[in-house]
Image: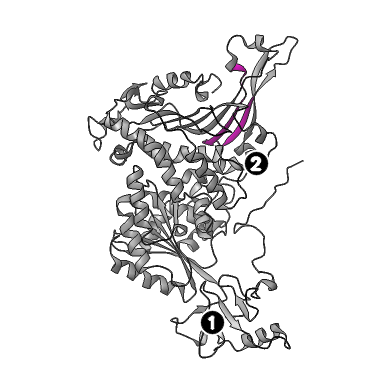
Amino acid sequence: MAATPISVSSHCCSSSSPYPNLSSIWSRQNPNYFIFPATSPKPKSASLQFNSNAFPTVVSMQDGSLAATVAGLQNEAPLKKLKDGLTSVTPPKENTQISNFVVNDGKSTTSITVVGASGDLAKKKIFPALFALYYEDCLPEHFTIFGYARSKMTDAELRNMVSKTLTCRIDKRENCDEKMEQFLQRCFYHSGQYDSQENFAELDKILKEHEAGRISNRLFYLSIPPNIFVDAVKCASLSASASAGWTRVIVEKPFGRDSESSAALTKSLKQYLNEDQIFRIDHYLGKELVENLSVLRFSNLIFEPLWSRQYIRNVQLIFSEDFGTEGRGGYFDHYGIMRDIMQNHLLQILALFAMETPVSLDAEDIRNEKVKVLRSMRPIRVDDVIIGQYKSHTKGGDSYPGYTDDKTVLKDSLTPTFAAAALFIDNARWDGVPFLMKAGKALHDKRAEIRVQFRHVPGNLYNRNFGTDLDLATNELVIRVQPDEAIYLKINNKVPGLGMRLDRSNLNLLYKARYSKEIPDAYERLLLDAVEGERRLFIRSDELDAAWALFTPVLKDLEEKKKIPEYYPYGSRGPVGAHYLAARYNVKWGDLGVDE
């Protein structure tokens, strides 16, 4: 029998009714007011035009809604008063002015501006993610997408550029070409400088034309280098913010390169934005298996009691790529693997994995628990860090370049392309449990996974069947984030036959075998959350401060001492030093086992 899916989603694709209960329209705070929610859908035949002369008893509330004062309700039905007021509303076609507050069909409109639209991230990730959301009917009914960059380009040229990267779901291709054309017709372009308030004011004027007087919500995605974040935010905030609805800004990493630069960036951004307007994106938090972490743990009784030092021997967070820094060596050389991968992607996963049960699934409750984990972590010692750098290698007649062979990298660069570290959380749940991180480029394979190795069974009756290597009998939970998303548990099992021979088998949930639906890209989930105002998967400023406070001292120590990285061949398993680091804590890297 097929499993019945259980859904508690509040996303756009859920079936919950958009219409509030009538009782919610009546203001409980003041019984003399009717509240018309600014974003709640109205019947399509109704159109509201706020005209202070026509309606002296109607006031515009701070959140953009309308409130009608009603006198003498003790002897008259309030709904009749409301109905009488609505029948005298002027139809929108009779009013050509959009300077007053206008609500067409009670709808708002969302304008998504991709700042840096001509860059690789925008072309390869952001526009395809927006199209996927449109294809799934997850974007608002009224939306417009604008590309903004310094490059000179027409609307048609932008659409042609974007069309080359759009694809439809493998499992859902009907009307694909038609959907693409409809999406592209909603894409526009405006050329301007990132530090020009005048250019952003021009963008604001064009956005207002497309918004057609509706309540405007605006989302800016900063797909630009970090050194111009503040200039772009300043211009967007002062010259192109939404006048009635919300304004939000998505900021891509890196968020500085140490505690000092990160704090300075946050301080500068908050001169023009509130914290709840800033969406710091880490796309790994949008990965399907990372988001499933809390479900796996908190929704399955068999795992939650085991999630502590009492049963878990170590936790491994592994990231590897089978290619080097080709094409982005200049950027990478300024940051290195620890800043690029460990301080954000892997540390965020660690915090989600190790946090206590939050009060609720509310974004602030979850982020509060993550911050507690980060603040409980022991300072990282230099002795607990191994760094490496890949060198050129020839294999099977093919030559692979070394890191410093890249023309954009200094020949004497000591920037690590590989790092392994042992981290510890000093709290009651995780005291003494090593969390081992490993991240590297130009390794033997591509993977991102979480490996949980459990303790040995005390007094195991079958120890003699495993010989002296008790690690062969260790239960291990593996959460493979990419590629080939999967969750599997390694157990000990008897091999069929007359003798007593044991082996390790996997209880395997392979996503592509279990689910026919294609897994959405991480950017799709995060963009949708940003549009809906869901902050759970975005990084809060105090969370960022705690992450940098952990890594900044060890990074400065490594750089001041000019520690020479251990060199490893392109396509190998990485520096030997990583194995010695793991052995120091009686751990073997799980991704290097025979069965892997």
Span highlighted in magenta in the image: 472-490
Q: Amino acid at mark 2?
A: Phe
Q: At x 29% / y 69%, what residue is drawn?
A: 198
Q: Is residue 178 above or below residue 216?
A: above
Expressed as whole percent of the image width and height from the top left, the position of residue 569 reads: 35, 23
Answer whether residue 154 is visible to the viewer in this image.
no
Viewer-side residue, 496 vs 293: 293
Identity of the residue furthest to the right in this view? 1
Asked whether, in this view, residue 553 is left or right of residue 346, the answer is left
Secondary structure under badge 2? helix
- N-terminal of the two: label 1 or label 2? 1
Asked whether, in this view, residue 466 is left or right of residue 585, the answer is right
Using the image, tell me which numbered label, if any, was put on residue 144.
Answer: none
Using the image, tell me which numbered label, if any, was put on residue 298.
Answer: 2
Answer whether residue 538 is visible to the viewer in this image.
yes
Q: Is residue 211 magenta?
A: no
Quadrant of the rendered image containing residue 185: bottom left
Q: Amino acid at mark 1?
A: Val
Q: Which residue is mark 1?
A: 59
Q: Residues within 10 Å of mark 1 (few under 14, many from 20)?
A: some
